Amino acid sequence: MKAFIENLVQAVVDIPEEVRVEEEQGEAATTYKVHVAPSDLGKAIGKQGRIANAMRVIAKASAMKNKQKVYLEVVGAPGEFGEDGG
């Protein structure tokens, strides 16, 4: 699933080599945090979040085949806003 999400995001952005996906296992669901280059953040999110929402729908549909629950978060480059995210 992680490689699938990574390929999906790389198809959307201008700098695909900067795409990194972190996987966080939870009790009920798995959260995937997608890190992109700061200049690609707008492309990964899209107008009114449409691209990010479309990627979430595809990831959730793919996970449903295995009866998994996933969440997808699009964030900027790690450390862009400091360690606390703000």
Image: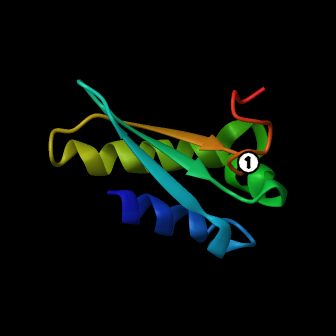
Image coordinates of residue 28 in percent, x first then y, are 24, 24
Left/right of residue 64 with respect to residue 23 in the rendered view: left
Image coordinates of residue 14 in percent, x first then y, are 75, 72
Q: Quadrant of the C terminus?
A: top right
Q: Is residue 83 above or below residue 1?
A: above
Residue 37: which quarter of the image? bottom right
Q: Nearer the viewer, residue 79 or 56?
A: 79
Residue at the location (37% across, 58% down)? 2
Left/right of residue 39 with respect to residue 10 in the rendered view: right
Residue 39: which quarter of the image? bottom right
Residue at the location (68% across, 53% down)? 44
Query: Label 1 belongs to which residue?
Result: 46
Number of numbered tags placed on the structure image: 1
Q: Is residue 82 above or below residue 37?
A: above
Image coordinates of residue 12 in percent, x first then y, are 65, 65
Left/right of residue 41 with respect to residue 34 in the rendered view: right
Q: Nearer the viewer, residue 16 or 84?
A: 84
Task: Sort mark 1 into few (<14), some (14-19) or many (20+) by Cα contacts within 10 Å.
Answer: some
Image coordinates of residue 15 in percent, x first then y, are 73, 72
Q: Mark 1: which secondary structure?
A: loop
Amino acid type at image mark 1: Gly
